[in-house]
Amino acid sequence: MEESRTKSTSDADEPVAAENEGAVLDLTSCQLHDLSSVDLPPTLTELDLTANRLTSLDPRIGQLSNLIKLSFRQNLIDDDAAVAISGWKALSGLEELVLRDNKLTKIPDASIFRKLLVFDVSFNEIPSLSGLSKVSSTVKELYVSKNEVPKIEEIDHFTDLQILELGSNRLRVMENLQNFVNLQELWLGRNRIKAVNLCGLTCIKKISLQSNRLTSMAGFEGCIALEELYLSHNGIAKMEGLSTLVNLRVLDLSSNKLKSIDDIQSLTWLEDLWLNDNQIESLESIAEAVAGSREKLTTLYLENNPCAKSPNYFATLKQIFPNVQQIDSKIFA
């Protein structure tokens, strides 16, 4: 069935309705303060209320028994308003609930949604993960970024979790991750983490620990499935523990304290290498340092290193990496 996306206007005489009942009703950026002017067909499967001015939850939403996806992103919903969610028994089949960018100060009670796959409470003012233990263990994607969370807790039961986003919080320790045997992506940037501890996980494909307090790369050695690793804006002085990451395609170590390029010579799938804003002195050993990926590498950033002032900087790198498409901001046809 073709999706219908109908938006309300301030001077509309008739209630807003989905053109094709049972499809999608998208009311993004309609500046709605409530849904009194909106018709909510009982056959709706998706309702998107992103970027409005809602301060309360219309009780009719709780009767939409066919709803699969529901987004309240970027509204003005607070804890008192969110209480209504816990009584929405008719929405037992809901798979995606988005409360991103509201005024929540605690995890709302979403225990009634026993088939939930995506739960997003990012960009609120939540001080802890307390309450997540009530959320269904079926969740595969959990987003709690840009809050005030100091500790990873109450998430052990999410054994099917594939994406965990806890960036921009107050975390100091990586912990309680050992049950996430299916985890594919772990996003922990902009926290206060000093050491890597993946609790024995080996299946992760993407990890971000940008803008933390790392001084060492120890801890990634066992992540043999890793494809993308983002470690910019830390205090790392040496590249190490990378030789076992044979599937690595993207490595970002920009804005650290590196003086040389090490431990990646055996990597053969590396496509993007970001080493700008470090202390790398010379280009002399770069061919050997990145030997395994000389033919594969397409993007290389080395600007704001002493070596970037070398004579014939671009020509030298282009010769070493014949298939490179971008060096720093310079793009090659």
Image (cartoon, helix red, strand yellow):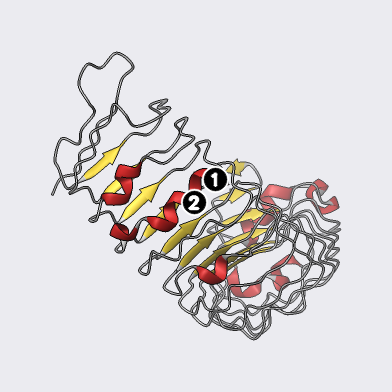
Residue where numbered disc 2 is placed = 83
Contact check, label 1 and label 2, Cβ < 8 Å: yes
In this rendering, does residue 149 appear at all? Answer: yes
Please provide percent x and percent y for residue 25: 26, 40
Q: Label for residue 207?
A: none
In the foreground, 130 or 192: 130
Q: From the viewer's perspective, tell me whether residue 324 is left or right of residue 17.
A: right
Q: In the figure, 164 relative to 45: above or below?
A: below
Badge 1 marks a residue whose secondary structure is helix
The residues bearing labels 1 and 2 have C-alpha atoms spaced at a distance of 5 Å
Identified at 51% across, 75% down, the residue is 158
Q: What residue lies at 55% left-to-right and 71% top-to-bottom? A: 133
Q: Position of residue 180 (x, y in %)?
A: 54, 79
Q: Quadrant of residue 95?
A: bottom left
Picture quadrant of residue 240: bottom right
Answer few, some or many: residues within 10 Å of disc 1's Cα (few below 14, many 20 plus, some between 14 and 19).
Answer: few
Query: Where is residue 327 shown, x and y percent of the image?
Result: 63, 49
SS at badge 2: helix
Q: Residue at x 17, y 49 (%)?
A: 43
Badge 2 crowding class, 10 Å Cα cut-off, few under 14, some 14 to 19, many 20 or more, is: some
Identify whether 92 is placed above or below 122. below
Left or right: 189 as drawn, with respect to 305:
left
Residues 332 and 237: in front is 237
Residue under the point 44% across and 43% down: 72
Report the residue marked by disc 1: 80
Q: Determine the image quadrant of residue 215.
A: bottom right
Q: Amino acid at mark 2?
A: Val
The amino acid type found where label 1 is placed reads Asp
